[in-house]
Image (cartoon, rainbow, N blue to C red):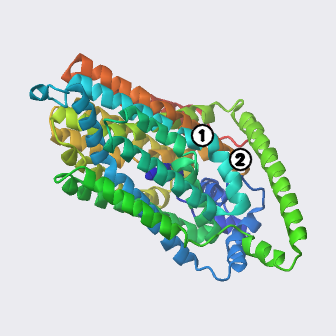
Amino acid sequence: MIDHVLNMTHCPPSLEKEKQQIGHAPDDGETEKMKMASIGDEATTEPLLGREESGEVALREPLARRKSYPHLNAKRVLIHLCILIALLDFSGYLILAPQTNIFENIICDKYYMGREEERDCKALAVQSELAFIRGWKDAFAQLPAIVFGLPYGILADRIGRKPVLILFLIGFILSDTWIKVVCYFPAQFPLRLIWFSALIECIGGGGQTFASIAFTMVADLFSGEDRFNAFLKVSATELITQIVATPIAALMMKRSPWLPLFLSSAINLITYALCLRLAETRPGRVEETSQSSFSPGWESDQQEQEDQKAITRDSVKKFKSVLKSTKSLLWGNSSVVILLLVFFVACFGKESLELLLQYISKRYLWDYSQASLSITLQASVSLGLNVLLLPGLDSYLRIQRNMPAPTKDLRLSQGSCLLLFVGYLMIALSPHPGAMLAGVTLTALGSSFPLTLRSYATSFISPSRVGTLYTGITVVMSAGLLISGPILYSLFRWGMSLDNFWLGLPYVFVSLLYFLAGVAIFSVGRLSKTQTW
């Protein structure tokens, strides 16, 4: 889902960095806080290809961008962007349970063809095929961003954010339509042809490209002081949409699982139409346009070609620089390497929630409309965590306990990891739905783990290396998302072949991974001191 990428990317910034950039002299305690506070700002103010600028210039840049676009209203553009994100997430969560139900019915119809009296869609053969198809579908869905993420980033810096967003929506709509066509004509198309939807999503680069550009557009418009509130609104929009869409889908499924799919197609077209009216935020676009209007056509074309060649050369140079910086960052810095492996584990936790619908339906014999309510529960708890609990706990540890920022992030990461370990173990072993839902609640309370871990990892490097660290995190998480689906769905198939008790085998595996992650974080915190590289 698109919101998974957004949630993993977002990390709240702090206002302490602003004080440092305008000449505030911090004490030793503030220095640590400011280094940690640079996470959100450093990550989100970077253009898609990176930037080497002084902190003072970066502080003034959003204002300069607004001067470049005097007609832009930053809040209005943010509202427009939030509406696009809400519609895309609403469409995605609207079809999550119904689409799984349709997949299951297609497999079941073909398996029991001519033997309707024996029909059992929860049988091992049907559920194994469903797990196999969904696992590889999720894996293939990661390939467009891995292969084309950088080229589309270059394109967004060259021609603007909006054209790449439009390309993404074209690819997304065509990909979604292809899946629905395959499902609507099961006699003509084998269900496994839905895997080719990932190939279509190469148009636009997939969900990770959308997330990258969405955050870049916010950074184009807001300074660090306002950017924090902007990202909070984006995150809240995603969670609220998830809470609303799932029960609506459950109600519509009582009539037909196809109703949510038809509605989602209409929503996707509305999203595309709204995107056409979205303002461009790429810095310098207006000046380039106005200057070229006073130049002869051949001169402007020649200048544009020269600019494009210069941008391409600069992009290749920066990409090589990133690879070199990543190598030097990791070489000899064992703490960062260990924490990057922990980020890899976090991908399995994300993917296991995609499996949850099928797991609940199979183990507790719920229909998919009932099982989808677990998603609403998870999103509701996550919203409360992000809006109320986590900010309050963060303030308590910093102010009341006077805890240094790295120590605070370490404690929050350890606590989240413990909640995830216990939560996934409860999901795996609970014989009753009530205990399973309690486990889902605990995993939701630990969902801030990637954010706090990202913040903690930043304390091991200098602020100038934050961009390199974040590149490494993105690569690791992309690789994790690529392989986690096939592994977890294979474990689910294996568990079904053993006994009903072993249906929770994927969640036992994820729980074990979080146990090892907790040991790794504890070891890094215990044995390592904060290093500056």
Q: Secondary structure at mark 2?
A: helix
Percent across and percent down for residue 491 are: 35, 24
Name the residue rendered at 48%, 45% in the picture: 450
Q: Answer whether residue 339 is visible to the viewer in this image.
A: no
**Disc 1, SS:** helix
Give left or right: position of 229 versus 252: right
Q: How many marks?
A: 2
Residue 291: x, y in percent?
83, 77
Given the image, on which type of amino acid does mark 2 rest? Arg
Q: Position of residue 7 (x, y in %)?
A: 47, 52
Alpha-carbon distance for marks 2 and 1? 22 Å
Query: Which of the 4 image quadrants contains residue 279?
Result: bottom right
Within 10 Å of disc 2 (Cα), the crowding (few <14, some 14-19, many 20+) is some
Identified by mark 1, the residue type is: Ile
Circle 1 crowding by C-alpha within 10 Å: few under 14, some 14–19, many from 20: some
Q: Which residue is mark 2?
A: 465
162 displayed left or right of 49 = left
Along the line of sight, the residue nearer the viewer: 7 or 296: 296
Q: Nearer the viewer, residue 12 or 240?
A: 240
